[in-house]
Image (cartoon, helix red, strand yellow):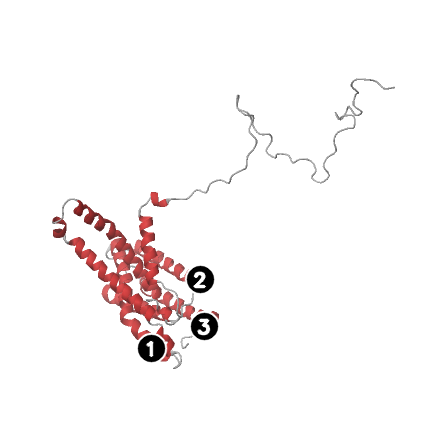
Amino acid sequence: MATGGWQPPNNPGQGGGPYGPPPQNPYYGPPPQNPYGPPPPAPYGVPPQPPGPYRPAPVRRRRWWLLSPLIPLVRSANRVAKRLFDKEGGGRVRDQLVDKVQLTRSALGVLSTLALVYMYGADGGWSGAATDGAANLFATPLLLLLTGPLVVLGFILYAPAHRRPVLRSRLHGPLKTVGWYVLTLGAFGVFIYVAGQTTLLHGLHGVMLFVVGFSLMAGLPWALVFLFLASAYVARSAFNTAYVHAALPPVLTGILVWLIAGFNLLSDGLPNGPLPAQLCAAFGGPLSVTALSLWELRRLRTHHGVTVRD
């Protein structure tokens, strides 16, 4: 018999309608649950907002140049020095393992020198040790200018007859590097001369005095850093002689390190300390550099197929 009005559900235990609860979607399953729990309630008077698209956290850039103005100065000088004194092309062979070993040897050499000076002292103290290191750095390019042409000429004469024109045609790279370095030394000397002329500054007044004085104050640190980096690049690449032959830099480095060690012994003698420490300080650097140069020549032959007579 039909009855009017509301009918109780067939399954009141499930709380569904007369036909039960709606079936779940067989393709997607139940809706995913928020692993972090329900969102916090909105403040009073503010309607709840739907969760919007999540944005990635902004990347915080470290602006160290705001803390130290020397960083952009060093970067600028290094960029120019590398562009002028560290060129690619010719017969150069890039080996990352050799670069890492050279950097490690240089760091260990500096640490060992500091340790010896700390333990046994030096004639001029720390300032004397720093002066000797800077003198060796700037003396290396000058010795390269004297010995480099003879070694390059020997490489060209030792090469086979059909390879000599190729090697001679690559000389423009090292010659250009030599020209840039000589020009750098000349410009630095002129800059120091002008900066030391106080009569020139006395003749200026007003805006011109401010412009010239500020240029000298800002240009002198940049010029010092640039000259230091240029000398380091020239000493490391031997005036880009690898442009002519890949084996020239290790050979020149092995020759120069013994020349510098001989000059240091003749001028300053053995360093302070017991005899084993003196021998290590005097000959440890040249022996390690020579061993590294021989290993680099062997690696050029075995891994890159480059021999001295190529």
Q: Which residue is mark 3?
A: 301
Side of 12 where 258 appears, left or right: left
In terms of secondary structure, where does tag 1 sit?
A: helix
Q: Nearer the viewer, residue 174 or 238?
A: 174
Q: Quadrant of residue 245?
A: bottom left
Who's the residue at 32% across and 76% down the image? 153
Residue furthest to the bottom in view is 161
Tag 3 or tag 1, which sits nearer the N-term? Answer: 1
Who's the residue at 18% across and 53% down the image? 195
Residue 75 visible here: yes
Q: Which quadrant is the C terminus positioned in?
A: bottom left
User: CA gap, disc 3 to disc 2?
Assistant: 16 Å
The image shows residue 282 at horizontal and vertical percentages of 31, 64
The image shows residue 101 at horizontal and vertical percentages of 42, 61
Q: Nearer the viewer, residue 73 or 42?
A: 42
In terms of secondary structure, where does tag 2 sit?
A: helix
Q: Quadrant of residue 53?
A: top right
For badge 2, the amino acid type reads Gln
Q: Which quadrant is the N terminus positioned in?
A: top right
Q: Nearer the viewer, residue 164 or 288?
A: 164
User: CA gap, disc 1 to disc 3?
Assistant: 19 Å
Q: Residues within 10 Å of mark 1 (few under 14, many from 20)?
A: few
For badge 1, the amino acid type reads Gly
Tag 2 or tag 3, which sits nearer the N-term? Answer: 2
Tag 1 or tag 2, which sits nearer the N-term? Answer: 2
For badge 3, the amino acid type reads Arg
Q: Which residue is mark 2?
A: 96
The image shows residue 207 at horizontal and vertical percentages of 18, 45
Q: Which mark is residue 154?
A: 1
